[in-house]
Image: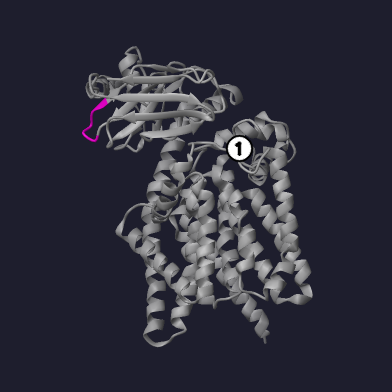
Amino acid sequence: MIPRSLRTAGVEVVIGAALAAAAWVLYWPVVRLWWTHDDFYHLHLLLANPRAWYVWDRIAYRPPPPKMLTPLLFLSLDVDRFLFGYRPALFHLHQLASLSLAPPVLYAVLRLWLARTWAALGAFVFLLGAPVASIALMLMVRHYVEVIPLAALAVGLWVLALRRPEHGAVLAVGSAIVWFLAALEKETAVLLVLFLLLIPEGSLRERLERWIPHAVALGAYVAIRLFFLGGPAQGYGFVVEKGDWPRLALTLPLKVAAEIRGRATPAAWLFLGVVLAGLGVAACLSRGNALRVGAALALALAPALLVSIQMEPRYAVATWMVAAMALPFACRGLAARGGAWRELAVGLAAVACVSGVLANRLDWRERLADSVRRSAEWRVFLAMPPGEMLRQPLGVPGELLDLRWWKEDVQHLPRGAGWFFDDLFLCLHPETSRVWGWDEAAQAIVDLTPRLPAIRRASCGSIRPDAALSVDLKAEPPGIWWSLGPYHRGRYRFVFDDGVATVDMPRTGGFHLRRRAPLSLRVKYESPDSWVTYSPLLAVDLEKGAEVRWRR
């Protein structure tokens, strides 16, 4: 006869294993990817700096980038490099294994309050979110993956420290240590230490006593951050002026909701609606719940506010975790009322699971296709001989610079291949003879050379050289500021090196620049009516703080 306690433990293990297996079922294709996104940037940092620089070399942290204190990210990638060499499939395998730990740990923590069904619901729904699908694909955001089980474990140990006074001190220290590791993994976990005090376990006095190790860990984290970065935070990316903060704060929930929804399909809208409904129900169950839900959302959104001018899916991961974890509490609260309320709770759970799976599969297919294309483009670039060009690759110019570094300086392959992001390059350089690029119909990189005359005619013919355009540029610390016009619809871009590099820009804004070298660029405007226009080449002396005003 198997003791009941062992049977219970066995059931919990099976559920946890099933949730981990769900991560593999949903996201296993990542192991077929090559390097993508900022992977070579991270490898560049690992190879260009002294061994294990991320745990001791403050000098390596000061120049831009990396600008962020994420030593455990670099440690994780460095372990892969030591164990696997430079085989990206094994890097992705490690990342998928790390992601598969998240749902069982979340389930175990939810079981501190919820029955098995509701706890499993929360962990499974979290796994289906579009932000989770996005971080499953990219090695560059492994810290967003590995911080999830660490943060959840810190919460679980904290609750146990308050529930089991005989081991409370040891469990509280364990929680503080795990939280400290989570904070060194990714800064989004830092504010979690404040939320612990709001969890309704024990009295306020008991929580404050158990929080002492966390206070020590928080002090240690701040000291380490000051040592490596020289301050609590450093600006990078787009500059946010004082007058912009209210607008950014008001629009942030909508931006995060869009990232949580992912691809705008009916299933995604339904999934988002159910999860938001659960968030609202959880907040309405009691005043204490309203306080905790509000505080959790505020602490999850706060780090994203700093970078929300240019929103990315990974910035929504923390908020998505809050929303997914609230849903099972909402269902449990409704079910406890019995009758039709219980049926409503079961219905919400069922709709969340079904719509979540459908939305996840549609969204995942698109995200995976993007990464597959990047993998194909980069592999072709490595094989390109001197003089050949890659047309309009995905990603940003900086990623291609690190790809070139990998090809020429690490692999010692022939130099001289290039790329361009804007077809203006073909208009200004008619001598370009061999070009490769993505073919949507073939879903592959093909030789575009036979099509070059047609591509040139279409691209150069769409340019309106006399169309109105205005540019105001000003170089002023901490970077460069601009105002573009006169159009309010359409898209603006900065174009560098005749189209070799382009960057999408809002009509007005500022960008942090650490380098003060001279800057030359064109401004491109793309009309919704499929025509474009360019400014002439504009030179900005960043060192002297020059101002450029141009009109046509």
Q: Quadrant of residue 309?
A: top left
Residues shaded magenta = 528-532
305 w.r.t. 173: above or below: above
Dominant SS in magenta: loop
Label 1 element class:
loop
For the C terminus, which image quadrant? top left
245, above or below 126, in the image: above
Question: Residue farthest to the front?
Answer: 243
Does residue 391 appear in the picture of this structure?
no
Residue occupying the point 64% across, 66% down: 197
Residue 333: within the magenta? no
Picture quarter containing residue 433? top left
Q: As rendered, which of 461 and 214 lies closer to the eye? A: 214
Residue 274: % across, % down:
38, 67
**Quick one: 450 or 133, which is closer to the camera?**
133
- Judged left or right of residue 231, residue 382 is left
Q: Position of residue 202 (x, y in %)?
A: 67, 76
Residue farthest toward the top in the current orientation of the protein: 431
Q: Which residue is mark 1?
A: 67
Query: Does 531 appear in magenta?
Result: yes
**Type of amino acid at the residue the image marks with label 1:** Lys
Residue 149 appears in view: yes
Residue at position x 47%, y 63% from top? 323
Categorize mark 1 by other alpha carbons within 10 Å: few (<14), some (14-19), many (20+).
Answer: some
Q: Quarter-wise, where is residue 536 in the image? A: top left
